[in-house]
Amino acid sequence: MSSLVPGVLDAILPDVYRVLAPNPSVMTGPGTNTYLLGSKNITVLDPGPDLPEHINAIIAGIEAIGGVLERVVVTHTHTDHSPGAATLAKRFGVPVVGSPIADDGYQDDSFSSDASLAHGENLDVDDSKLEAIYTPGHVGNHYCFLHHKSGAVFTGDHIMQGSTVVIIPPSGDMADYVDSLQRLLRYPIRYLAPGHGSVIDEPEAEIKKLIAHRQGREDKIVNAMTSVITANLDELLPIAYDDVPESIYPVARLSLLAHILKLQREGKAEEQAGKWSLCSRAI
């Protein structure tokens, strides 16, 4: 479904267009995907970073489609997804729809919304509906959106193509993340349109794969904790994540903590003076 080239307007599904931001990195993959929905009254979903070249590409995309911008919607407020909202809102005089959250050092602290959506609420996008699906886990204010006409769910950072996502406590929560993956399985999804990477055309298989991956990682962490009896995060990391490059360890450490906090809340792990161990009933 087309290539990922920054600044190019790609028609990827009926009334769904993508503009890739020029912000590739370890965390963002090829960059952040901004989606333009509709052909008459256009919704911009995840405007991405506030980079002049990206904003100009979005504006050029709106003009090429031949519609007018009606609103800007964000899946969440990490700094690679929402900063462009304010610039577009000011330029076109349109509302921003999204849910603010307290800054934990990773949020777009400039973000301001005119409205937020509740789980299950719909927005009109031309002759389709855009349904909000509350998916906390990656961060507490994360929403996915189901575009009924195309059958695509825009997953933001809940699901990325070609990679798992990092869960950063306290805003990120591993139990919530897995529950949110399970929630998506209840919807009639034809495609997953991620915040990073290409469209995924086998959504159910992808979601189930991610759930299995998280359970497998948790099992590996439990085995690591069993082998060392008691250890801090840095001691557990190379055992529980021995299948990833060391260059990824700083990111993996965040998800390791999220997994262990989940085990703690389930009564399976405990912490004393920075050292973690399994509770006796969990062994």
Image (cartoon, helix red, strand yellow):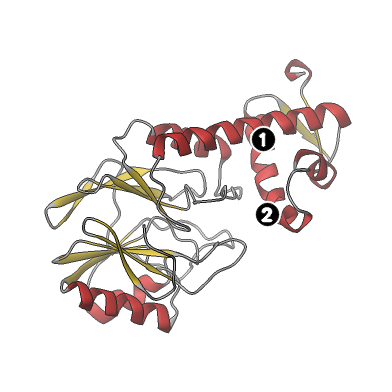
Q: What's under tag 2, amino acid-wise?
A: Val
User: Where in the figure is residue 135, as x and y percent of width and height?
Assistant: 42, 43
Label whose residue precedes the other's in the sequence (2 or 1): 1
Determine the image quadrant of residue 156.
bottom left
Which amino acid type corresponds to the residue marked 1 in the rendered image? Arg
The image's mark for residue 217 is 1
Name the foreground residue: 15 vs 235.
15
Residue 29 pos. (x, y %): 55, 62
Q: Residue at x 73, y 48 (%)?
A: 244
Q: CA distance from mark 2 to mark 1?
A: 14 Å
Q: Say which quadrant the N terminus sits in.
A: bottom left
> Residue drawn 51% across and 62% down?
107
Front residue (pair 111, 239): 239
Taking 216 as reference, is 275 left or right? Answer: right
In-image side of 42 versus 274 (left or right): left
The residue sitting at 51% across, 43% down in the picture is 137
Dot 1: element: helix
Q: Helix, strand or loop at disc 2?
A: helix
- Residue 111 at x, y percent in the picture: 41, 67
Quadrant containing the C terminus is top right
Residue 43 in picture, x, y percent from top left:
24, 63
Q: Is residue 93 visible?
A: no
Location of residue 239 by image quarter = top right
- Residue annotated with mark 2: 251
Callout 2–callout 1 Cβ contact below 8 Å: no
Give the number of callouts: 2
Q: Residues within 10 Å of mark 1 (few under 14, many from 20)?
A: some
Q: Quadrant of residue 90?
A: bottom left
